[in-house]
């Protein structure tokens, strides 16, 4: 691993978690969000007796406003680089954590679990890893704002409202979709999407997940049934691979009538309650 990328504020969260003596839950966000998007989830898990940390991706700005002032800081981040960042943070915890991730954060959560570093893992609408073959049209359309221009490989890309509405908020009314776009959405690196797009043609892809490690621990895959960005065939293929290759508990929960915004929209608690109940069974 390279030199640590853990920021001072992330180290402070780690020390708070260690001082609590409680089992930690680590939250991993995906593209177009910041770690602050997990705050309501953190409050819920802490109300249920856990401590939490929510590191950002390396060098993430602290706020949405700052993200749009300095969008270039998002460029060039890679799947493995971000995974290593979270593993560094986890390695500083005194207790083995549960890990919860959404979208590319769900992929990274499964990569973390594949190293044996997670006591229980919840992967929500995960980006596909190498070996997951379905590529539905809606997923391609959702990724087109990035993949449609090869020069986006090294850039940070923001979504306009119509792009966000299609990929994230297709199940929400216009008012809530606009509120989420204004409150949570930030630019995102194009590189991880290009890495995922060619994963099945690259045996060394950074999107590889070790689904066979017997130390992976319990895994819950949560799927929003109407997600355009990560449609149900992707999460179902993920479940099929993980349950086939691993002796650990592997489950899937399909959430009806929910899109990719399910972790941040007004129905977030329905999803979070499922995650809490799963984690409580094991840690």
Image (cartoon, grey):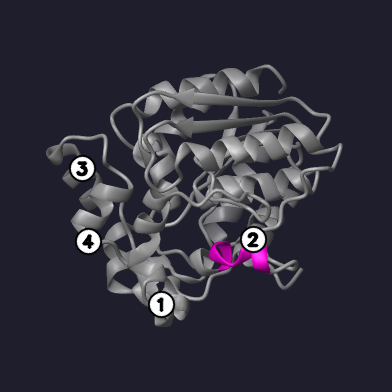
Task: State the residue at coordinates (70%, 54%).
Answer: 87
Residue placed under numbered mark 3 in the picture = 177
The answer to which quarter of the image holds residue 236 is top right
The answer to whether residue 214 is seen in the rendering is: yes
| Rendering coords of residue 283 (x, y %) | 71, 23
Specify the quadrant that holds the N terminus.
Answer: bottom right
Kindly identify which residue carries mark 1. 152
Q: In terms of depth relative to the viewer, which is nearer, 227 or 26?
A: 227
Q: Vertical placement of 151 versus 240: above or below?
A: below
Residue 264 % position (x, y): 35, 38
- The residue that mark 2 highlights is 85
Q: Which residue is mark 4?
A: 160
Range of magenta residues: 195-201
Residue nearest the observer in this picture, 196 or 22: 196
Residue mark closest to the camera, 1 vs 2: 1
Mark positioned earlier in the residue sequence (2 or 3) = 2
Q: Residue furthest left?
A: 175
Q: Earlier in the sequence, mark 3 or mark 1?
A: 1
Q: Are marks 1 and 4 in contact (CB under 8 Å)?
A: no
Q: Earlier in the sequence, mark 1 or mark 2?
A: 2
Vertical comparison of 46 with 238: above or below: above
Q: Earlier in the sequence, mark 1 or mark 4?
A: 1
Q: Is any part of residue 92 visible from this angle?
A: no
At which x and y percent is residue 265? 30, 35
The mark found on residue 34 in the picture is none
On whether residue 198 falls in the magenta region, the answer is yes
Position of 227 relative to 196 (above/below): above
Give the CA distance from mark 3 to mark 4: 12 Å
Q: Is residue 122 magenta?
A: no
Q: Main secondary structure of the magenta part?
A: helix
């Amino acid at each position: 691993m390279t030199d640590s990328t853990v920021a001072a504020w992330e180290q402070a969260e780690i020390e708070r978690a260690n001082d609590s003596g409680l089992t930690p839950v680590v939250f991993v966000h995906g593209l177009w969000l910041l770690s602050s998007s997990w705050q309501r989830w953190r409050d819920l898990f802490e109300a249920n007796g856990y401590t939490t940390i929510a590191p950002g991706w390396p060098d993430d700005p602290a706020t949405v406003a700052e993200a749009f002032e300095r969008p270039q800081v998002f460029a060039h981040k890679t799947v493995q680089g971000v995974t290593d960042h979270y593993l560094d943070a986890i390695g500083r915890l005194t207790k083995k954590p549960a890990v919860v991730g959404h979208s590319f954060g769900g992929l990274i959560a499964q990569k973390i679990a594949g190293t044996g570093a997670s006591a229980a893992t919840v992967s929500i609408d995960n980006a596909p890893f190498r070996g997951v073959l379905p590529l539905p049209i809606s997923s391609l359309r959702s990724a087109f704002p990035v993949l449609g221009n090869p020069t986006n490989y090294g850039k940070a890309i923001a979504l306009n409202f119509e792009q966000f509405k299609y990929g994230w908020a297709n199940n929400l009314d216009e008012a809530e979709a606009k509120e989420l776009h204004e409150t949570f959405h930030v630019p995102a690196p194009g590189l991880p999407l290009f890495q995922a797009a060619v994963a099945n043609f690259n045996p060394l892809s950074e999107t590889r997940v070790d689904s066979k490690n017997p130390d992976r621990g319990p895994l819950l895959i949560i799927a929003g049934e109407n997600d355009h960005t990560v449609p149900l065939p992707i999460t179902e293929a993920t479940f099929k691979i993980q349950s086939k290759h691993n002796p650990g508990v592997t489950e899937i929960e399909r959430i009806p009538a929910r899109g990719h915004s399910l972790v941040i929209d007004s129905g977030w608690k329905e999803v979070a309650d499922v995650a809490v109940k799963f984690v409580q069974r094991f840690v």
